[in-house]
Image (cartoon, grey):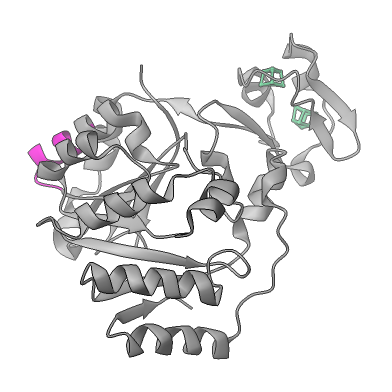
Amino acid sequence: MNPLVFDIQRFSIHDGPGIRTVVFLKGCNLECPWCQNPESVSPKAEIAFYPDKCILSKDCFEVCDKNAIIFEGDKRIDYELCTGCGKCSEVCVTNALKLIGKQRDVADVLQEIKKDIDYYNSSGGGLTISGGEPTLNFDFSLNLLKGAKELGINTNIETNGYFNWNKFKELLPFLDLIYCDIKIIDANKNKEILKGNSPKMIENIKRLSEIDVPVEFRIPLIPTFTSTDENLNDIINLLKTLSIKKVHLLPYHNMGEAKADKINNKLHKLELNYLSQDDLNNIKILFNNAGIKVKLNN
Ligand code: SF4
Ligand code: SF4
């Protein structure tokens, strides 16, 4: 079965070298509370509601046969009843309702990617598959990467590091670059906060550090979760053991929270303070003192 694609972003300059098209797949096996793409977590289709655009025409109410349309202040959807069929979004003329996640097949997505092949060639860009965790939609990801390589398109995948290595290694011949997150090392905290499996994720990081395909290890700096002294020291110790000499640090921003609100996702109400420039500089120094170079987003 084809996965749900929730966005295809053209002309991205943040997801690998050059100008890229990023294909975002729904479905994730972690529950990071700071997720920047909360609409990616569920593998199912969801309806987002934008109250500012609603003109109260009630067309949505007429087409919903699940009684899931409600008119309670800024609420329009009863998420207990909604099945994500998308009928309401089709009749909403102002786009106050938007269906997140549409089934697309590989050929159809490749057609979209091909449109910008000249830009990839002139900028050194290409395709990036993201999510969610794209390896959960393994066959789709594999075939999309194969199709892109047949067209001579550069490829990247963004993974959270929680994948089955025996499957993942089948992707390697079709990848030019891998972005892999490093989040929480302590096994109990990893399980409690992310619902992940730290030993398995560490094993994957180790394997990725040994392959020929270039890997960019990315560390989200999330106050109280990942940028604690304890976790940063754990990460640095791991990097030193694996002789990883460079990482990309991604400071927290709360863009995901507004998106989570639109789909009634309660996990992402963090309201954390941003790290100060001094905090970021100190973290950079911590890595540099361990012999690890950092790229730091501001
Ligand atoms: S169809 Fe759209 S604009 Fe009309 S009431 Fe429903 S959400 Fe609001
Ligand atoms: S997506 Fe379908 S079930 Fe959900 S509110 Fe819209 S019409 Fe009703």
Vertical placement of residue 241 versus 269, above or below: below
**Direction from residue 144 to residue 11 in the image, left or right:** right
Hey, which quadrant is residue 185 in on the image? Answer: bottom left
Q: Nearer the viewer, residue 252 or 75?
A: 252
Task: Give the quadrant of the N terminus.
Answer: top left
Q: Is residue 263 left or right of residue 160?
A: right
Span colored in magenta: 144-153
Residue 32, visible in the rendered structure: no
Residue 233, given in percent of the width and then of the height, sits at 44, 75
Q: Is residue 149 magenta?
A: yes
Q: Residue sitting at 89 percent across and 29 percent down?
A: 71
Residue under the image location 80 percent in, 22 percent down = 69
Total marks in image = 0
Q: Compared to 249, does 212 lie above or below?
A: above
Farthest residue to the top: give it: 65
- Percent position (x, y) of residue 78? 79, 25
The one nearer the camera, 135 or 63, is 135
Q: Nearer the viewer, residue 32 or 107?
A: 32
Residue 294's image quarter? bottom left
Quick check: 110 above or below 260?
A: above
> Is residue 7 or residue 135 the one in the foreground?
135
Tell whether 268 sits left or right of 155: right
> Going by the picture, which residue comes out furthest to the right?
72
Report which quarter residue 211 is drawn in: bottom left
